[in-house]
Amino acid sequence: MGDLLAGLTEAFRMIVTLDAELIEITLRSLRVTLTALAISCLVGLPLGGWLAVRRFRLRRAVIATMNALIGLPPVVVGLVVYLFLSRSGPLGVLGLLFTPTAMIVAQIIIITPLVASIAYQAMRDLWSDYHDLLISMNATRGQRIVTLLIDARRALLTAALAGFGRAIGEVGAIMIVGGNIDGATRVLTTAIALETGRGDFALALGLGIILIALALIVSWGSHWAMRTERQGTW
Amino acid sequence: MVAALPLTLTGATLRRQGKTLIGPVDLTLGRIGVTVVIGPNGSGKTSLLRMMHGLQRTADGHVGWSVADAIARERQAYVFQRPIALRRSVLANLMFPLRLRGASRAQAEARARAIADRFDLTAMLAQPAPSLSGGEMQRLALARALITEPEILFADEPCAALDGRATRQIEALLAGTAAAGTRLVMATHDMGQARRLASDVIFLLHGRIHETGPAKTFFAAPATPEAEAFLNGDIVE
């Protein structure tokens, strides 16, 4: 109990005093995660729509693989990205290891299957409703996907939030490829891991509380912006 | 503009998993009139309409328009038995087919508002389409199908599950559409409706055209005993 209380107090203190380091790593967390999420959505949402409307031979295999990739262990993703980006690796010349960019790359790999899979499921259900109508109206394949993306937008918000949740709370991969370098690649989760290791539970817990609050604020904000659960059933 | 009609079906057959749903059907649809497709449940009314519209690919035979298929596709519209509402406002539903064809937003909206007026939908334009009542939804489906001014409209039991007042409203709109020169092909199980609207009749039984002819002669003196029994309200199997 004592640790919990101390954690709350510490979180409160850091927020009230606008602790410079806290603000820096919080903003970095947000920047890395939101960049990764934006790219994942750009890839994953249309991919989900494409899988919903397209029938091809390996479709089921692709979908099963995509669902399996949701469970990709972040540590392994981090390791593989590390090997690619390390100086002796194939992409070593880019010098990206231990930069926020490397962390973004790892997070994209981790959350894209999740975003695509949830998006696919939402749009598959919508497609079974819309199928006859869109075929009858002679919509092109691109138009079909765009229609699904627009009309399933609220379910797609869930896909994006799931991706955000996974990315913002991720520690294994970004620790490996980012290196938790103070002032360069330290983010909320890696800082928590570090402080816990150092035995500063109050600081670790304070950062944890801020991390959870951040996730809540993003979720509330996006639901409010999309007006979910307010009009109609979708 | 070269007309897409007449539509000619030669030996057209639809199968699913080895089972023949409809056909072989030989049929020519001329440029004017209201063809009403009747027959017991499972006789293939929906399948026939879907096959003509190209929603289902024929297993055998041919569905031929008088113009290239790609052009013919643009000249048809279909109203489904269970109307499909896009999860958008009524206005956006009406604009949708025009937007698909590349009309500008302003242009599409102007035409949508004009057709909404004709179909008594103006009061609901801002409402989400899935929240409409059955009758309103069917009017929307009809308006949305007709907004592209198709040459031929397929309607699959457009008044199923509607009450008397809503049915009368839809029938009046269908009759008006036909009078304005749109070719109408509709399936119905309502013989009263068939009599009111049909200029000619296709009587289906077991996936085949059992009898066809002008509505007047068909209803006055059906040529086959099955058609006569069906018109009398007997159960035809």
Image (cartoon, coloured by chain):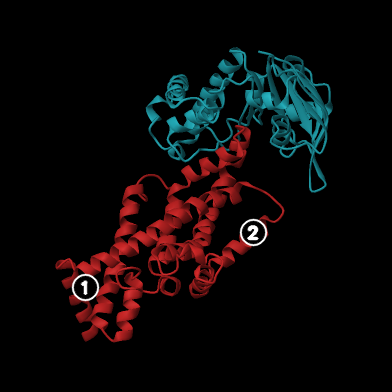
Q: Nearer the viewer, residue B125 or A15?
A: A15
Asked which quadrant contains residue A158, the reply is bottom left
- Colour of chain A, in one word, is red
Q: Position of residue A146 (x, y in %)?
A: 52, 41
**Chain B: colour as depicted:** cyan
What residue did someone put label 1 on?
A11
The reply, left or right, for residue B191 in relation to residue A119 is right
Q: Count the marks: how many?
A: 2
Q: Is residue A213 visible?
A: no
Residue drawn at x 51%, y 38% as measured from the top left: B85
Q: Is residue A70 above or below residue A224?
A: below
Q: Nearer the viewer, residue A133 or A1?
A: A1
The amino acid pointed to by label 2 is Val
The dot on residue B172 is none
Position of B162 relative to A192 (above/below): above
Q: Element type at marker 2? A: helix
Name the quadrant containing residue A207. bottom left
In this rendering, position of residue A141 left or right of residue B69? left
Identify the residue position indicated by label 2 in the image: A62
Amino acid type, callout 1: Ala
Q: Chain of mark 2?
A: A
Left or right: A177, with B207 as reference point: left
What residue sits 38% from the left and 66% below the top? Answer: A168
